[in-house]
């Protein structure tokens, strides 16, 4: 049976495995214990909202959103920072279900919207997000400063 729901501490072991796969996808070294610690902190401190997709008790994917704020709108935004589906479960609609959960969170928290960033070369994401109602906002430049 397919299900999407809010993550709980009991999901930590499976969620850390998925999170590790996600990080490897983005060329980071595997570190499941650190992934578990990071996610446990997020869940316990309520720093983020994490939703999981599961099939017959097996976690197949997750989305993680962080709260941010718009000063000009004087409202909360949600930053959809992480979305990942295990390679064996892609193409089954899990991404869209997790995005729908994200939209429900946005509405329930009276936020003004959801922001996300994806690479120009992410063909799957660049097809997925517009199909879920996201609009490409190309009137600004995105800059980053890294604290090395």
Image: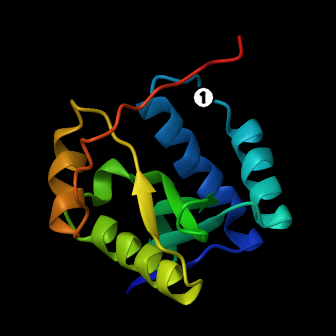
Q: In this view, does 99 lie to the left or right of 124?
A: right
Q: Look at 24% across and 37% down and name the residue there.
A: 122
Front residue of this view, candidates 71 and 29: 71
List x then y, in percent, for residue 146: 63, 18
List x then y, in percent, for residue 30: 60, 28
* Residue identified by numbered label 1: 30
- Relative vertical location of residue 8 with respect to residue 87 in this rendering, above or below: below
- Relative vertical location of residue 133 with respect to residue 128 in this rendering, above or below: below
How busy is the neighbourhood of tag 1: few (under 14 within 10 Å), some, or many (20 plus)?
some
Is residue 55 at least partly visible in the picture?
no
Q: Look at 39% across and 44% down and name the residue there.
A: 117
List x then y, in percent, for residue 111: 54, 76
Front residue of this view, candidates 77 and 18: 77
Q: Look at 23% across and 32% down and name the residue there.
A: 120
Quadrant of the rendered image containing residue 42: bottom right
Is residue 103 at least partly visible in the picture?
yes
List x then y, in percent, for residue 12: 71, 61
Front residue of this view, candidates 42 and 87: 42
Hey, which residue is sitting farthest top in the picture? 148
- Relative vertical location of residue 65 with respect to residue 87 in this rendering, above or below: below
Callout 1 secondary element: loop
Hey, which residue is sitting farthest front in the picture? 72
Q: Quarter of the image containing the C terminus?
A: top right
Q: Which colour scheme is used?
A: rainbow
Q: Quarter of the image containing the N terminus?
A: bottom left
Q: Is residue 38 left or right of residue 11?
A: right
């Amino acid at each position: 049976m397919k299900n999407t729901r809010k993550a709980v501490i009991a999901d930590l072991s499976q969620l850390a495995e998925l999170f590790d796969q996600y990080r490897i996808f983005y060329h980071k070294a595997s570190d499941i214990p650190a992934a578990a610690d990071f996610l446990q902190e997020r869940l316990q401190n309520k720093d983020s909202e994490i939703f999981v997709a599961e099939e017959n008790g097996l976690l197949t994917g997750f989305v993680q959103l962080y709260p941010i704020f718009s000063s000009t709108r004087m409202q909360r935004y949600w930053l959809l920072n992480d979305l990942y589906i295990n390679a064996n479960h892609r193409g089954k609609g899990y991404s869209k279900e997790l995005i729908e959960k994200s939209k429900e969170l946005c509405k329930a928290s009276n936020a003004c919207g959801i922001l996300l960033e994806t690479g120009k070369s992410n063909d799957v994401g660049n097809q997925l997000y517009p199909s879920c109602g996201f609009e490409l906002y190309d009137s600004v430049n995105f800059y980053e400063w890294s604290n090395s």
